[in-house]
Image: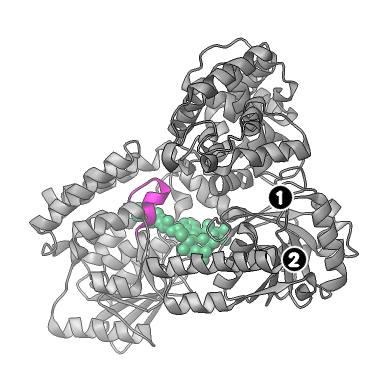
């Protein structure tokens, strides 16, 4: 796991633990031994620490967390590294994250390649750095620069890292040679700079700025246990000596590893990566080449999808039926790019390149040269089938034909072509250029190489593709529909919109379902219920009154003078009471916990059905979809993980009760949920069944 080469007084230790050189027990032991050997070897004057592969070190091995510790611990190895009597210089060729940056900071010098990025992302896993990161980074760059980095978890690119002082230099070319030179310079000078000994960046001004940042962070997220812990650990470094402060950090880290929030976030991390693997789709499935794309429809969705291709360097033709719509669509895309360039998130050159990769055209025949065609036209089966039957005659042989439908039967769309093996669904989320999730809908006849190519393409577009099967609404919208239905029912039974929304935001969503409905537009659900069936008596009445939500200034709430947050409307509350009376529903009050149960348990139930039917391969795929497409709080791990923490027996019993109370049989627990509840099982346990 660590290669050891000695040449000309320099020992080069190279970590070789693919794919990300995570610092698991074996790697730690090997590194520790290699260091000891280099120290003992009299021919060695200096040591260079390098790593194989694209990533320098992706951190501690997350899969070890919560398991019995295996020595040597990372803090112990880093302490010995720090105390090493010979200069050690890190050669950072790629990402140095978490324990990886902590490792680099325990060295006596750091040289980075321009492609390197450095950060402490532990916060995103519900923990804080636990191998000296909360102490060494503030000593290296000041607490006021270090704290925001640890609070957001966002890595910085090499150039910025050098400007901040995290690395000594960024070098082009032979990184190990540069690190070797730096180490020999240190040896010649007799200096052994240790980050732990530095205090020059711990100025009174920097401390004050840190305290102000800390106060704001805690205020913004008062329930985030790890934010509090981070503040305590950084503050300890300002008030106590290094070793005492490291002990504070260590104790906080150990406590956080056991926190249910961190467990959920770690679960979500691995679920997201597991989603890339589709059961029964071998790794070596051949891929089709994708060098050009066409998007049908220049609406918000089509434009956003085209931007994904342009961002990834793939030329794309946007196709419309008439010039006006095309011009408007292309203008919107241009504006979005101009906005990004203005904000500085892309350079002006990037803006021009990306805009230049998007070409507009009138008429489907312009899709003939594309390796993949994505239809993002009106959500209507007739429209889609007409497009696909024409595409069948236009697209080149072997082109992938994808539909961006959010609900419709992809098998029925594929069936109008003579090449259903080339057809699949790619359900992007709005705004498509921003949202990472893509539901990849595998139809009955989709060929394995088409699916494999789509999944690879998803990654190339910087998306998070999750494979799902064909059913109405796939995974995400099918479960969402359950929540919407339960929400309407709650209104009739006595919970008012603001109370429901408050319970849902307190649960951790950024927005409640009614505020969300107002934002999206109540006319959308209303029209789709008209097309696909189903009734939402309150929402439909509001839409019939022309109350479409924010865009009309009135929906479930009032938005006077273009306000972005709604206020309660007595008229709506009276309307709800009237509708409830018409439906003969007796009203009562609901606690926030009852509201959450009423809304979320039916979603979990639908998730169980989705698993039974094989629409999703595993509970983790459902959770990945809900966290990344629907803003389910990641620290609750997604609906299926959350259901396990609540207890499936509790949920099954409650659903039986809801079915009786509401007279809605579809609330009865699904067979899978019933079975797991009876066995004392969990969704997590299914994987190992
Ligand atoms: C930490 O360091 C705590 C310390 O402060 C204190 C300790 C005492 N562990 O993402 P990818 C796996 S906490 C275990 O697809 P990419 C991953 O599951 C850690 N496994 O690659 C996947 O496995 P598989 C702080 C890990 O190129 C494979 O590697 N660090 C770890 O798109 C490839 O991963 C972080 O939070 C890990 N640390 O992105 C960084 N990292 O192929 C977490 C990856 O079987 N990692 N794996 O599904 C990342 O952000 C990305 O993996 C990285 C590469 C950017 C490095």
| 368 is within the stretch colored magenta | no
Q: Is residue 143 left or right of residue 22?
A: left
Neighbour tally class for label 1: few under 14, some 14-19, many 20 plus, Cα within 10 Å:
many
Q: Magenta stretch: residue 125 in it?
A: yes
Q: Residue furthest bottom?
A: 8
The range drawn in magenta is 120-132
| Residue 70 image position (x, y, % from top left) | 40, 51
SS label for mark 2 = loop
Q: Residue 468 bears which disc, if any? A: 1
Helix, strand or loop at label 1? It is strand
Numbered badge on residue 321: 2
Q: Earlier in the sequence, mark 1 or mark 2?
A: 2
Location of residue 642 in the rendering, given as x and y in whole percent from the top left corner: 54, 34
| Ligand 1 within 8 angstroms of badge 1 C-beta | no
* 26, 125: nearer the viewer: 125
Q: Quadrant of residue 26?
A: bottom left
In the image, residue 258 lies at what x, y percent?
40, 39
Nearest the eye: 133 or 501: 501
Neighbour tally class for label 2: few under 14, some 14-19, many 20 plus, Cα within 10 Å: some
């Amino acid at each position: 796991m660590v290669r050891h080469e000695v040449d000309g007084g320099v020992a080069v230790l190279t970590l070789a633990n693919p794919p990300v050189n995570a610092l698991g027990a074996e790697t730690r032991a090997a590194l520790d031994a290699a260091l000891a050997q280099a120290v003992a070897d009299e021919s060695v004057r200096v040591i260079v620490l390098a790593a194989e592969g694209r990533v320098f070190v992706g951190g501690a091995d997350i899969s070890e967390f919560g398991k019995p510790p295996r020595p040597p611990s990372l803090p112990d190895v880093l302490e010995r590294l720090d105390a090493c009597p010979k200069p050690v210089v890190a050669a950072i060729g790629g990402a140095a994250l978490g324990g990886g940056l902590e490792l680099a900071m325990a060295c006596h010098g750091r040289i980075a390649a321009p492609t390197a990025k450095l950060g402490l992302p532990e916060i995103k896993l519900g923990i804080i750095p636990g191998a000296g990161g909360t102490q060494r980074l503030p000593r290296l760059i000041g607490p006021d620069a270090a704290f925001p980095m640890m609070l957001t978890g966002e890595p910085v690119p090499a150039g910025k890292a050098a400007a901040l002082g995290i690395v000594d230099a960024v070098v082009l070319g032979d990184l190990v040679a540069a690190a070797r030179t730096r180490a020999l310079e240190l040896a010649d000078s007799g200096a052994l700079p240790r980050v732990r000994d530095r205090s020059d960046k711990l100025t009174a001004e920097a401390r004050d700025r840190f305290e102000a940042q800390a106060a704001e962070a805690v205020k913004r997220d008062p329930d985030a246990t790890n934010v509090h812990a981070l503040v305590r650990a950084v503050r300890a470094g300002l008030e106590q000596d290094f070793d005492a402060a490291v002990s504070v950090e260590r104790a906080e880290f150990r406590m956080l590893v056991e926190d249910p929030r961190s467990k959920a976030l770690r679960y979500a991390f691995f679920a997201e990566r597991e989603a890339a693997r589709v059961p029964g789709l071998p790794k070596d499935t051949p891929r089709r080449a994708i060098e050009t794309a066409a998007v049908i429809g220049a609406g918000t969705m089509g434009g956003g999808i085209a931007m994904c291709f342009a961002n990834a360097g793939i030329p794309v033709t946007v196709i419309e039926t008439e010039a006006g719509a095309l011009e408007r669509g292309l203008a919107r895309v241009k504006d979005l790019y101009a906005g990004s360039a203005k904000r500085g998130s892309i350079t002006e050159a990037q803006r021009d390149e990306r805009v230049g990769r998007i070409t507009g055209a009138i008429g489907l025949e312009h899709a003939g040269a594309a390796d993949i065609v994505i239809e993002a036209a009106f959500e209507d089966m007739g429209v889609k089938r007409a497009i696909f039957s024409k595409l069948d005659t236009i697209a080149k042989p072997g082109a992938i034909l994808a539909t961006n439908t959010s609900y419709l039967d992809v098998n029925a769309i594929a069936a109008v072509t003579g090449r259903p093996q080339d057809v699949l669904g790619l359900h992007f989320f709005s705004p498509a250029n921003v949202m990472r999730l893509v539901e990849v809908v595998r139809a009955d006849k989709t060929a394995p190489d088409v699916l494999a190519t789509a999944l690879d393409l998803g990654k190339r577009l910087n998306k998070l593709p999750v494979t799902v099967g064909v059913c109405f609404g796939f995974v995400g919208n099918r479960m969402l529909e359950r929540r919407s239905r339960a929400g309407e029912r709650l209104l009739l039974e006595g919970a008012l919109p603001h109370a429901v929304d408050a319970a849902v935001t307190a649960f951790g969503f950024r927005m409640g379902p009614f505020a969300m409905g107002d934002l999206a537009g109540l006319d959308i659900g209303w029209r789709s219920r008209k097309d696909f069936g189903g009734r939402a008596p309150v929402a439909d009445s509001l839409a019939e009154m022309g109350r479409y939500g924010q865009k009309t200034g009135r929906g479930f709430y009032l938005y006077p003078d273009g306000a972005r947050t709604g206020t309660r409307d007595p008229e709506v509350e009276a309307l709800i009471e009237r509708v409830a009376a018409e439906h003969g529903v007796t009203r009562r009050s609901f606690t926030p916990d009852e509201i959450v149960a009423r809304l979320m348990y039916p979603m979990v139930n639908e998730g169980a059905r989705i698993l039974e039917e094989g629409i999703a391969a595993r509970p983790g795929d459902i959770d990945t979809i809900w966290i990344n497409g629907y803003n389910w709080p990641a620290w609750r791990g997604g609906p299926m993980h959350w259901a396990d923490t609540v207890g499936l027996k509790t949920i099954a019993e409650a659903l039986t009760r809801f079915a009786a109370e509401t007279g809605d049989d579809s609330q009865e627990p699904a067979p899978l949920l019933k079975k797991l509840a009876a066995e004392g099982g969990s969704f997590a346990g299914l994987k190992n069944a």
